[in-house]
Image (cartoon, helix red, strand yellow):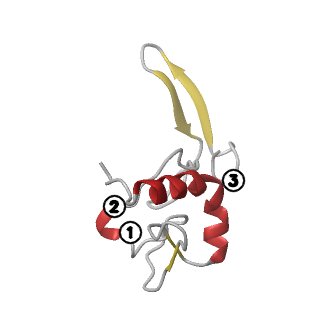
Amino acid sequence: MTKGGMESVEVFTSEGKGRGLKAQKEFLPGDVIFAEPAYAAVVFDSLTHLICHTCFKRQERLHRCGQCKFAYYCDRTCQRAAWLNHKNECSAIKKHGKAPTEN
């Protein structure tokens, strides 16, 4: 999904290279042109207690998952948003006794 719809970019096909996006207007540095939710994401081991595992914001005080004690969240909203994906990971961490490394 593009920011603000598709009116600012055009999808085109390049012979031998595949599909691409062509700007239909001038963009400034830092403008978001294209955004899509991540299929998968991992917080580095050294940052697990500093980064929310849902929104990836850096926070000084995060709330840890009460079940697996591995995942950290900004608040209940982030924790609820993560639950559908986290519940399988959570039970696996509890069963194994520790979380896998980022590798």
Q: Name the residue under label 3.
A: 4
Query: Tag 1: Cα neighbours inside 10 Å, few (<14), some, or many (≥20)?
Result: some
Identified at 49% across, 47% down, the residue is 40
- Residue 48's tag is 1
Q: Which of marks 2 and 3 is in front?
A: 2
Question: Taking 103 as reference, is 80 left or right?
Answer: right
Query: Tag 2: Cα neighbours inside 10 Å, few (<14), some, or many (≥20)?
Result: few
Q: Name the residue under label 2.
A: 44
- C-alpha separation, residue under disc 2 versus residue under disc 3: 32 Å
**Nearer-the-camera pick, 60 or 84:** 84
Snapshot quadrant of residue 44: bottom left
State yes or no: discs 1 and 2 in contact (Cβ < 8 Å). Answer: yes
Identified at 46% across, 71% down, the residue is 69
- C-alpha separation, residue under disc 1 versus residue under disc 2: 6 Å
**Nearer-the-camera pick, 61 or 25:** 61
Q: Where is residue 48 in the image (x, y as percent from the top left)?
A: 38, 68
**Nearer-the-camera pick, 19 or 49:** 49
